[in-house]
Image (cartoon, grey):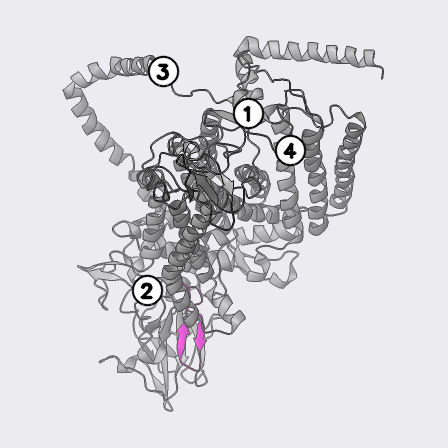
Amino acid sequence: MSTTDERMAARKRAEVERQALDAIDDRLGSSSFLRSAMDKIFPDHWSFMVGEISMYTLLILIITGVYLAGFYHASNTVVTYHGSYKPLDGVKMTDAYRSVINISFDVRAGLVMRQIHHWAAVVFLAAVAFHLCRIFFTGAFRKPRETNWIIGLTLLLVVMLEGYTGYSLPDDLLSGTGVRVVYSIIESIPFIGTWLAYVIIGTTYPGENIEPRLFVIHEFLFPLIIIGLLTAHLMILWRQKHTDFPGPGKTEHNIVGSRLWPQYTLKSAGLFMIVFAVLAAMGGLIQINPIWIYGPYTPYAVSAGSQPDWYVGWLDGAVRLWPHWEFRSWGHEIANPFFPGILMPGIVFSIMYAWPLIDKRLYHDYAEHNLLDRPRDKAARTAIGVAAITFFADCTFASATDLLGNNFQMPFERLIEIFQYGAFVGPIVAGVIAYKVCKSLQLSSSHPIKRPTGGIIIRSAEGGYHTLGDDHGAGHGADGRAGNGHSVDGHDGDTVGADGHPGDGQGRPDDEIEEPVVAAPAPPAQESGPS
Amino acid sequence: MTTTNEPATSHRDGSPVVRSDLTEGPYPEDTPPGQDDTWYRFRNDPAGARRAELRIAVCFMVTAAASVALAVVYVLGGQPQAEGALLFFAFTGLGVGFVLWARDLLPGHDIAEDRGDHSGSETARQMVVGALNRGLDPMMERRLLLKVLGLAGGVFGIVIAFPIASFGERPLRTLYHTAWRPGLRLVADDGTPVRLGDLPINGIMTVFPEGVTDDNGLAASQTLLLNIGDLPFKVYPGHGDWSPILNGQRYVAFSKVCTHAGCPVGLYNRGSHQLVCPCHQSTFDVLGRCNPVFGPASRSLPQLPMAVNGDGYLVARSDYTEAIGPGFWNRGDGSNGVKPT
């Protein structure tokens, strides 16, 4: 094609575009919004993809979930199986279980859809958890983003329950056992537990309504809540603009990155496709939840090695680790599962919900922040986060005590005791180590290439020499506590070395240094400040 | 790599983009400084652009080819592994193609923009307060109306929730009683009644009340029957005849529902005579009347009172004398007193 033809085509296309946009704008007046939307800047750091990944896995869950809902029978009616999977021929099972067996063996592309759906759920929760960690450790929850922190935590709660209800739908032996345990946990809630369990299940366990009720919760109620909350989450993000890491050219007042159109749109669409690709490969090639092996649920059978999906593991582990306490008096009792199943997660989530407030108190920092912290610069926060993750990990591994016991030829009693101690000692040790590591990372350089190695010797106005940090070191704790959260250059709450002074990378007060000289091994003093 | 230094302009309001911030620090050398809105990686490199275009085209071709193969697999009857693998290639082709297209041939990298101030002005805030009180002030004056509205809302709010109760029956009787009745024979899961003497020493089996087939009945009534031989068994005073003996071998029966979280206590350690719950490893000592010896359970598995009928079959002497399974708020005082209904 010649250039003239191309030019003609472009002109023609512009006319068509114009007509279409005119038609829309006449009716919606959307031009200025579209304009600013397409120009909107999104920063490029890789860790910001994790939230996107969770959004796209959700989309994949909706697509595959709608497909599966077309074949699933939410019914506890007992039937006798006579299908194409011969090992189960003649076995009594619920209609729900039979329909999932049919999806797996008789519906063309059914198994791949089912396994993509399950893998997507597993990855979804992992991405959400990773996203939460990223937000926490970088301080992205600080003002003005507390609302989104709270919405995000609520999403996490609902999404965990959504995953659990989905896990329970096939009515196989494993999921039925999971339902039994949760029924007991609900039953153990003081005052209302007994009634609540009955309201949910209709009668004593297992009842006849559980699958229909779980289904309407899983495919209607919770998705509605999730989509509603996610919409709010994204609208607030859009309004407040994304946070960004400090770095060259970045300040509290600007945002550097790619425009929504076309750069970010195509990159993000590409990410969606790649996420779908990986999940499709997992769904096709890696078996997950082979319910035909577990068999249908019977209330009096159970297999060893009953594990929930990973995101419920910390609760299952806590239920195993909790000592055999129960409180009985005045004709009432608080049964054991209440403490690890309701109270402990309740406390954990309360602390997480309150964290923006706690963080403000901890660092005396009530200012707005668009630039993120580096985890090392907020050593106390990072240590607490690492301790919490260690606690969750300990509980999660404890949910596999029976499998670990088999693998390592250890009595499960010893393993449980180890994990019980681990739940206390592990977080403390990990937290202290994290704190120390943060502190030494602060002392070493932020960007080893950019700063001189060795210590810094200062020549004072009188002509004397001293190593930076020797007599100035008592001032400004980089985690902001000693220095009440105001860094030396006046950026509220910013930390030394991470305060948007690009190229400096050393975070020392400029007015203190007259002639930095690179010297031999004396440790550099990042944290010195006006005492 | 091109390094144009022309300043970008903001198109949002016509004012220039705040670039001053970008000059605060040096860019790392691999990042082109001061990109404008039309810069892209191969803008000044037609040969490179051509190669990039080819790469992206190959990606999209992979998608097209994988799609054709996917169609063939589906039409031939479907095969999960092939479907997964082909979906992977189809999506990867699209995904990598998009990313490369954006990276190499499309503008919009490294643009800086002023965040602007998202909070409203003082005047705006005052106006909102004014608008709010335009309604609230006259409403608050009507004390009577507010009180009556509070009453109506409170009463109606409670009553409107009544239908929730329809979701469940009243949780009383069914929590304290199982399907066991005096004289009901103990049967295996295939319906065969069990005779005293059917189990070998140290044998164990799951039994149910004869004639019970519904899941709820089976779930609550499931019972473990054990032959503990002549081992010393801690008999509760007055319960000596709950566990029949034949030829010196004692038969005992306990609820199979774990008193911790309700799983079936399905594992039996023949060496130590301990029952272990596979869910959370609560461990019960059979010879100590199934008292918990390890794990989170804090209550013994209830014992089923047994007898032998005229034909030598094992029968229930009565229902369990306490509520089986995990604890709940109004279970009672925790001793063996069953709440009457």
Does label 3 lie on the same chain as label 1? yes
Question: Who comes first in sequence, dot 4 or dot 1?
Answer: 1
Viewer-nearest of discs 4 and 2: 4
Residue at which label 2 appears:
A323
Residue at which label 4 appears:
B29
Q: Does residue B70 appear left or right of residue B179 in this picture?
A: right
Question: Who comes first in sequence, dot 1 or dot 3?
Answer: 1
What residue is shown at x 30% (from left), y 79% (from top)? B242
* Dot 3 amino acid type: Ser
Q: Secondary structure at mark 4?
A: loop
* Dot 2 amino acid type: Pro
Q: Percent x, y for residue B186?
A: 40, 74
Residue at which label 1 appears:
B22
Viewer-nearest of discs 3 and 2: 3
Q: Answer above or below: position of B74 versus A330.
A: above
Q: Percent x, y for residue B301?
A: 33, 70
Q: Does residue B82 appear left or right of residue A531 in this picture?
A: right
Q: Secondary structure at mark 1?
A: helix
What residue is shown at x 52% (from left), y 32% (from top)? A502
* Dot 4 amino acid type: Glu
